[in-house]
Amino acid sequence: MPKEKILIVDDEARILRLVRSNLEPSGYKVLTAMDGDSALTAAEQNDPDLIILDLMLPKIDGFEVCRRLREFSTVPIIILTAKGEEVDKVKGLELGADDYLTKPFGVPELLARIKAVLRRTRVPPTQRQEPVFNLSNFSVNFAQRRVVAHGVDVKLSPTEYKLLYELVTNAGRVVLHQDLLARVWGREYRDETEYLRVYIRYLRQKIEEDPSQPKLILTEPGVGYRFAAPADQPAEAAPVPTGT
């Protein structure tokens, strides 16, 4: 089985050495870059399975690297943020990062995060008996992992697809916040509600006709989310009989 490739992007050589020295013995192939330009080139040429991306980089910062990566790739991204910089974490997630790690970090935490992200972003096997879900102007073909909304193919990252999958395959039922977090991100993320809020917003922006008034992904305040079922869609008005 080929080794999973991890691209580490950081302008501190000691961080690169630290991560490499711990990932390679764990069975990963490690690639490195020390600035944003090199990171984008390495990502295009090597098609890594995961990127660990520092936000404070020369030339092009990590936020811009993340934004550009998402223009052509759904590769999982773990961003490295400074301690206490909550705003950076949220901004990174909003730009498409899958997870974050705060500096300074311990090697066990780094390895755990990598395993968790790779686990949840692997393409899930085809499940359920029904190969296609249809609702109004929205459909999911589970065999092809194809999502269509309002006649347009929707491009989703692996994490976005996995979250959508959990919602759609439970259409009509409320899925609790902690259950979604556990199924999509892993049991160790059951309390990380910020991830869920950000990714629900991503999905609404991509599949809802009006994300500010969602009709597909419905919020059950303080409880969880429910994907609309056919029963939620308004029936067409019956024709009014006319007298003769």
Image (spheres, grey):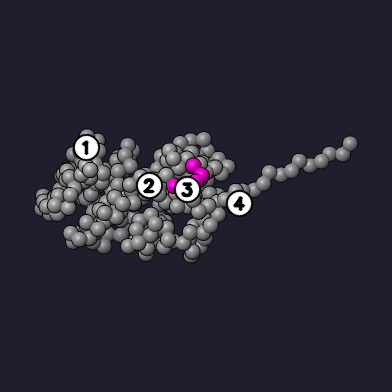
Residue 91 on image: x %, y %: 33, 52
Residue type highlighted by circle 2: Pro
- Mark 3, Cα crowd under 10 Å, few <14 / some 14-19 / many 20+, is few
Please name whichever residue, 143 or 151, is drawn nearer the observer in this view of the structure: 143
Please say if the residues under marks 4 and 1 sit with CB atoms less than 8 Å apart: no
Residue type highlighted by circle 1: Asn
Q: Nearer the viewer, mark 1 or mark 3?
A: 3
Which residue position is annotated with label 3? 128
Instruction: Tell me the CA gap for discs 1 and 2.
Output: 23 Å
Residue type highlighted by circle 3: Arg
Instruction: Tell me the CA gap for discs 4 and 1.
Output: 45 Å
Q: How many marks?
A: 4
- Mark 1, Cα crowd under 10 Å, few <14 / some 14-19 / many 20+, is few
Instruction: Tell me the CA gap for discs 3 and 4.
Output: 22 Å
Which residue position is annotated with label 4? 232
Residue 235 on image: x %, y %: 67, 46
Which residue position is annotated with label 1? 46
Q: Which residues are magenta?
A: 127-131
The residue sitting at 55% across, 51% down in the picture is: 228
Which residue position is annotated with label 2? 124
**In what quadrant of the picture does the C terminus appear?**
top right
